[in-house]
Image: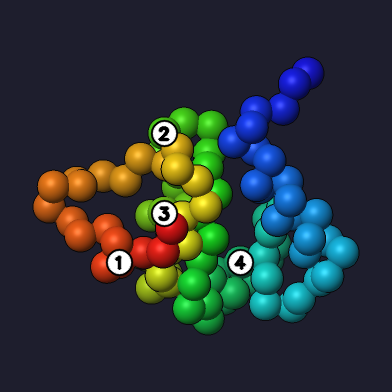
Amino acid sequence: YERSPLAEVRVRIIDYYSENPKEWASVGPPVRSYFRRMGMSRFCLVPAGLTAWTIHLYEAFFFGCVPVILSDEVSVPFQEQIDWPSLSLK
């Protein structure tokens, strides 16, 4: 099994927070306090998914976070209507 290059950033994030746990960080498997943590966050990491878009982008907006897009491969919707550079970090 060969890991996708898109998964490398996700794996590095999980490895970092596994070695440096923070009570406010949520990476890896689901946690009970996910909604609370997301609701308290100012910035939400948006790593690449297995497709051109990722649910994490939509979750960031739902929770009121500034999405931090960690991949050039993530396709953002409505590029002609939405000024993504003013709403997110890449």
The numbered disc on residue 57 is 3
- Relative image position of residue 54 (x, y in whole percent): 45, 43
Q: Residue furthest top?
A: 1
Q: Amino acid at mark 3?
A: Leu
Q: Earlier in the sequence, mark 3 or mark 1?
A: 3
Viewer-nearest of labels 4 and 3? Answer: 3
Whether pointer 4 and pointer 3 mark residues with C-beta atoms closer than 8 Å, the reply is no
Question: Helix, strand, or loop for circle 1?
Answer: helix
Q: CA gap, disc 3 to disc 1? A: 11 Å
Q: CA gap, disc 2 to disc 1? A: 19 Å
Q: Earlier in the sequence, mark 4 or mark 3?
A: 4
Q: Amino acid at mark 4?
A: Tyr
Q: Which residue is mark 1?
A: 87
Label 4 neighbour load within 10 Å: few <14, some 14-19, many 20+: some
Q: Amino acid at mark 2?
A: Ala
Q: Which residue is mark 2?
A: 52
Q: Residue at x 53, y 39 (%)?
A: 49
Q: Amino acid at mark 1?
A: Leu
Q: CA gap, disc 4 to disc 1? A: 23 Å
Q: Residue at x 66, y 47 (%)?
A: 10
Q: Which residue is mark 4?
A: 34
Say whether residue 51 is visible: yes
- Relative image position of residue 45 (x, y in whole percent): 54, 60
